[in-house]
Image (spheres, rainbow, N blue to C red):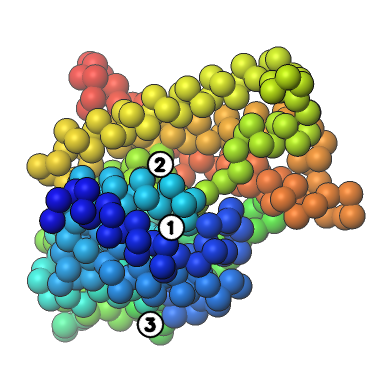
Amino acid sequence: MSLSKFREELRFWLFENCPESIKKPMLQSELPSGGKRTTYKNPETKVWLDRMALKGYTAPTWPKEYGGAGLNSDEVSILREEMSRIQARPALMGMGLSMIGPALLEYGTDEQKAEHLPKIASGEIWWCQGYSEPNSGSDLASLQTKAVVNGDDYIINGQKVWTSGANNADWIFCLVRTDFEASKHNGITFILFDMTTPGISVKPILLISGLSPFCETFFEDVRVPRKNVIGTVNEGWTVAKRLLQYERTMIGGGGGGGQRVRSLVEIAEKYNGKSDGRLNDGQLRDDITQHAMNNKAFGLTVKRNVEESKSTQAPSFVSSMFKYYGTEQNMKRYEIMLKAMGTQMLGWQGDGFDRDELTETRAWLRSKANSIEGGTSEIQLNIIAKRVLGLPD
């Protein structure tokens, strides 16, 4: 099928199948994360998910046998363009699509792919990540969660922290230490297991935003089948590093997804007014213009990288640049928004603030974690210096 024909048919399908409420800005409570325990505040969120999943558009590049649509990069670009044209929200978000799914495609066995990928693409399973520990953050390879062989299983004991969405997750992809004699980067194994397995307990962590998206996760004699290992035993660091590249691309916005948000111009006009078609505040005009130009340049850089990596379909160390610059842009956006909204973006509750203002306050506070999650900004700069620019240690 020609690209023009594909666009024509896709446009008609979106017109027929995208609910009207899905074309409006998305609330935090309406994020389409999927999972067995998810309740949908907006019923059309689930309708949209099911329709997109049936077409394979939730994971458009994945093979059809695994729940994808088997689209090439040009077709995926058209899909994103047409969804953007009607301002449609993504049908599904989360670590399943952006992190463990791609890692399974690269490192999983045929059986593991067949078991997990269709459930990810359909939104049936919500995944969380078991990486960081209380004493292993930036130095992740020092992790101490232990897995000991017991027949056909591993017995896992230890603790993870900052486990995003663990209190709602169905499955976890986890790093465990299986060889305590090897060097710290070598005795690590990458394994998957069900969060309902006996011995797992989860404690949400309250953040300054008032939300608890992160958790402490505890493992006490958790029995996990050895067949759930991804890749090679004791060589899980290889899988872990690759998955981090997928994560950093996702966090930085290089994955092409993300939710639709109110524009800075719209917000600035509401709180500062305009005259003769221009914002009244000249400094605010400059800040918004510069931010928009940087966003455009960043988007073109991401697009160029996609074109250059068509043959591999996998991220590289450039993902650290996406993560660093993308998160800096996001944090800068909220600082500009704060300048535009003034004290109306500092409300926590009460009649003096509307729903959008209270939402933006929490989002601004939440954005402060951008420089830490997925590897700190300092770590990303080191990777860029060494692995991208080739600078000496």
Image quadrant containing the C terminus: top left
Q: In this figure, which residue is indicated by the disc labeled 1?
A: 90
Q: CA distance from mark 2 to mark 3?
A: 33 Å
Q: Is residue 306 visible?
A: yes
Where 354 sits versus 139, above or below? Answer: below
Contact, CB < 8 Å: mark 3 with mark 1?
Answer: no
Q: Is residue 44 left or right of residue 50?
A: right
Contact, CB < 8 Å: mark 1 with mark 2?
Answer: no
Q: CA distance from mark 1 to mark 2?
A: 13 Å
Q: In this figure, which residue is indicated by the disc labeled 3?
A: 197
Where 79 sits versus 298, above or below? Answer: below
What amino acid is labelled 3 in the image? Thr
Identified at 10% across, 42% down, the residue is 311
Q: Is residue 111 left or right of residue 360?
A: left
Q: Please name which of the two marks, 1 or 2, marks the residue nearer to the observer.
A: 1
Identified at 53% across, 25% down, the residue is 291
Residue 299, position in %: x, y? 37, 32
Q: In this figure, which residue is indicated by the disc labeled 2?
A: 253
Q: Is residue 125 visible?
A: no
Identified at 19% across, 48% down, the residue is 3
Where 195 sits versus 177, above or below? Answer: below
